[in-house]
Amino acid sequence: ISGTSQTSKLTTNNTPVTATQTITIYNPSASITPSTKDVIATENHEISCVLTDIPSQISGVLWAPATDITNEYTLEDGTISGTSQTSKLTISAAKLVSLKSTSATQTFTCKITVGTSNTEVTATQTITIYNPSAAITPSTENVYAVENHEISCVLTDIPSQISGVLWAPATDITNEYTLEDGTIS
């Protein structure tokens, strides 16, 4: 609500004295979309926290449990535009691997405090960390040129079915190579 006015009137010696104050009321909120996300530990993950209905630039946006640590977490307050500001947390791939060793599921919270009573305004994202790997067993095998040969590659710690698995140097060529994605189990 903008432009709300309050007028007080005081009468002294039959002379009215009037004062007016105009106030703007803000109702800050924070949001992170999506609230849950599967992430792959081979690349950095960025979380954006959108702060809305704020009157001015917020400095020192807090991200729990993260603190600004080189090669682990990068925190950015962002810049206000109108009455909104987007703060960002970047989690390095190396930190994701480290976090996964403790628990594959991690929750991160963006927080600001507003008003004279230091009211907390927060938003969270819960991530599930995957660190995919591939294995072909055995890695070396003797085969006869007169027989077809099948090679299986087992992909582990993947969030969902993968389509278009690449086999180098093979490409799907009739009567030479047949490539199949397989199924997740």
Image (cartoon, rainbow, N blue to C red):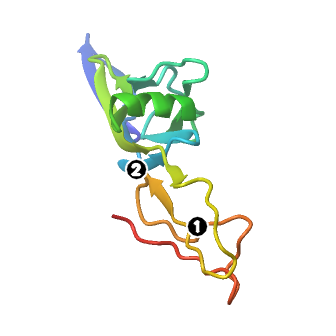
Spot occupied by residue 147 in the image (x, y as percentages of width and height): 62, 81
Spot occupied by residue 67 in the image (x, y as percentages of width and height): 47, 19
> Is label 1 or label 2 in front?
1
Q: In front here: 151 or 2?
A: 151
The quadrant where residue 70 appears: top right
- The local crowd at label 2, few if under 14, some if 14 to 19, many if 20 or more residues have their Cα within 10 Å, is some
Circle 2 residue: 37
Q: In front here: 104 or 80?
A: 104
Q: In front here: 16 or 102?
A: 102
User: Taking the image as drawn, is residue 107 in sight?
Assistant: yes
In the picture provided, is 77 more to the left or to the right than 122? Answer: right
Query: Could you tell me which residue is drawn at 48 percent across and 34 percent down?
Result: 96
Amino acid at dot 2? Lys
Relative vertical location of residue 5 with respect to residue 170 in this rendering, above or below: above
Q: Earlier in the sequence, mark 1 or mark 2?
A: 2
Spot occupied by residue 106 in the image (x, y as percentages of width and height): 34, 35
Circle 1 residue: 165
